[in-house]
Amino acid sequence: MEIPNISLVEGSFSDLSAFDDGEFDLVFGIETVSYSDNKERVVSEIARVLSPGGKLILFDIYEPKPQSEMTDFEKRVSAITFATMRLPAEDQYIGDVKKYLARHQFSQIDTVDLTEKIVPSLARLERYSEYYFHHRLFLKTLKKVLPYDANINGIAGWLMPLTFDGENVRQYNRIVATKK
């Protein structure tokens, strides 16, 4: 089925050279920028392709405080969870992302903590992950048929609730910013 005003393009969000400057009025992403190992580059590319007054809307996971303010336990849980989610451990502080947005012509940067809204999904994910780890035959079968990263991600499902339990290790954010 073809939709007249939608084109699918495969590429990298850190290289949007397939698009002209100011080509878009809206850039929308769900759990995307946090996976970049160069978030400032991604923000720069988004700013380039957005028209003046264009909106950026992101839903993503970030740390609400810098690592320098975390306890050793929080740092360890965070690092393990990032590794199992295949997220780079560096540059995950929401304050840095807001700084990159301001540096690259964004104003009216609004962040809303939606962590409370995802807790039921995290609880469900944790239950599924527990099943994964408590049934050895099931685990052995999945290890044979699923890619390695999918199996590793099962660990993240088990650990993620620890990082969203009110200890302020992780937040699920909605970020809305307007390009100047």
Image (cartoon, rainbow, N blue to C red):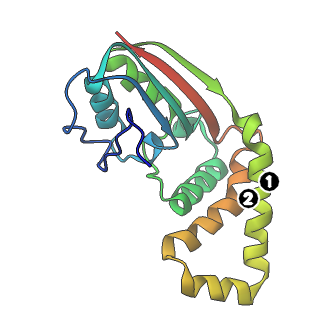
110 above or below 126?
A: above
Q: Residues within 10 Å of mark 2 (few under 14, many from 20)?
A: some
Instruction: Using the rendered view, name the quadrant where residue 180 is placed.
Output: top left
Task: Report the residue marked by disc 1.
Answer: 123
Q: State the image coordinates of residue 31 (x, y, percent, origin top left).
A: 52, 43
Q: Is residue 162 left or right of residue 11?
A: right
x 80%, y 63%: residue = 127
Q: Amino acid at mark 2?
A: Leu
Q: State the image coordinates of residue 59 (x, y, percent, origin top left).
A: 56, 35
x 71%, y 36%: residue = 115
Q: State the image coordinates of residue 8 (x, y, percent, origin top left).
A: 35, 45
43 above or below 176?
A: below
x 72%, y 85%: residue = 138
Q: Amino acid at mark 1?
A: Ala
Q: Residues within 10 Å of mark 1 (few under 14, many from 20)?
A: some
- Tag 2 secondary structure: helix
Disc 2 and disc 1: Cα gap in Å? Answer: 5 Å
49 above or below 54?
A: below
Q: Given contact means CB atoms under 8 Å apart, are the residues at marks 2 and 1 in contact?
A: yes
- Tag 1 secondary structure: helix
Nearest the eye: 6 or 56: 6
Task: Report the residue marked by disc 2.
Answer: 125
Q: State the image coordinates of residue 37 (x, y, percent, origin top left).
A: 36, 47
x 33%, y 33%: residue = 40
